[in-house]
Amino acid sequence: MRRQALIAGGGIGGLAMALAAPRADWNVQVFERAAEFQEVGAGIQLGPNVVKVLHQWGLADVLRGVAAFPEFLQVRGAVSGDVLGTLRLGGVMAARYGAPYATVHRADLHGLLLEAVQQHTGAKLHLAQPLESFHQTPQAVTVRSADGLSIPGDVLIGADGLWSTTRQQLLGDGPPGRTGHLAYRALVPQTTLPEHLRSQNVTVWLGARMHIVHYPVRGGAWLNVVAIVHGDAGSAADTWDHSAHAADLAAALAGSHATLQDLVGAIASWRLWPVCDRAPMQGAYQHGLGRVALLGDAAHPMRPYLAQGAGMAIEDAAELGGLLASATGGDAAVPRLLQRYAANRWQRNARVQARALRNGRIFHAQGLLRWGRDAAMKLLGEKLLDMPWLYGGGSH
């Protein structure tokens, strides 16, 4: 009999796992809390380390149909407007790392993964059926759904995101923490913007206690804009998404460059996310114990200053899928494979989490640190912005 993988969560990480596990000849069931599969409006940057995985899964053509492929990433001063550094993407990055750098709408990435799961696997997708608890023995893991169903399997993969109930039962280490940073996000058709505000590349504006990044999505037809500022969301701090007004953001950008203020002023509708995270992973146990593995934000939520949150979830799925393919032997085989998965992944994910934290301090620097950052970037440019350890891929 084929082994059974139970997946909590039908987001990008859960669907990536639902695609990877059947490639390893496993049966899959996905349990999603929402009544329909959907992703809210926001963009994602996919480094070549992630695009390479999607290509290996046969998704190159569909990704090409929905993503944009910028030619360069540019860093600018939010006040001066000066170009501080440039990283060549496009063909340069593809030649260097074996895959291009892509920018994509979250919903488009989620949609292509969902379509691939539905068309190319026999995975069973359960909507409006979150998993409430699990019980594991050395021989099996059994989950209980919200409607009282009891479902046995060989492995449970917690891909249920930042507020993972799987993690809470497995590790009991409390909720993620507030960072004191707020993310304003907007998506706008480029044709509605003045010509000088349209862009087909990635631009990062660095200011004091804030930064803004924008890049094309949906084949370049839309512009994704994210502004992250220091601030307190008050009673809404645990709310994932709610409306925000341009005036709130404009106040935080007082004194910034005219082009940046024009861009924010041209966008009327914003959504607000309080940024939450956890400290970098401290050990392999945080990726899984026994027959339960954690994947993506359930294991290693990170600040969005390295643009690798979704990427690390996809890398996790690729690694775990590759290991599941070797699940032969008796009952002890699966827990051993999950131990290998945890050992192979936790240090890379901890490094990405730590680098995202460091980037946040650098991006939002003030005073002498800000001066030193700008001087170093102007001097070293691409050497500072390129990250071979990251873009070269993980252990999968």
Image: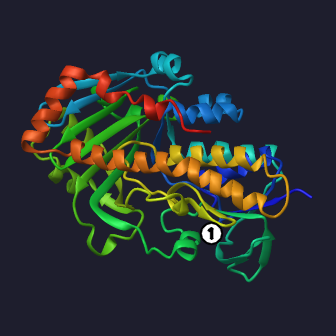
Three-letter code, disc 1: Arg
Q: Is residue 221 visible?
A: no
Estimate the x, y position of residue 342 in percent, counting from the top left.
58, 54
Q: Quadrant of residue 174?
A: bottom left
User: Between residues 18 and 392, which one lies in front from this camera angle?
Assistant: 392
Is 172 situated above or below 164?
below
Q: Residue at x 36, y 61 (%)?
A: 243
Task: Please identify the quadrant where the N terminus is shown.
Answer: bottom right
User: Between residues 201 and 8, which one lies in front from this camera angle?
Assistant: 8
Task: Determine whether, in the image, residue 69 is placed left or right of residue 121.
Answer: left
Task: Determine whether, in the image, residue 1 is placed left or right of residue 357.
Answer: right
Estimate the x, y position of residue 240 in percent, counting from the top left.
42, 64
Task: Please identify the quadrant where the C terminus is shown.
Answer: top right
Crowd around label 1: few <14 · some 14–19 · many ≥20 (10 Å): some
Q: Secondary structure at mark 1?
A: loop
User: Between residues 165 and 141, which one lies in front from this camera angle?
Assistant: 141
Task: Determine whether, in the image, residue 380 is placed left or right of residue 396.
Answer: left
Q: Residue at x 48, y 49 (%)?
A: 347
Q: Residue at x 63, y 51 (%)?
A: 341
Task: Determine whether, in the image, residue 179 is placed left or right of residue 190.
Answer: left
Look at mark 1 in the image and give the residue it sits on: 33
Judged from this view, the residue extending furthest toward the right is 1
Is 209 situated above or below 144?
above
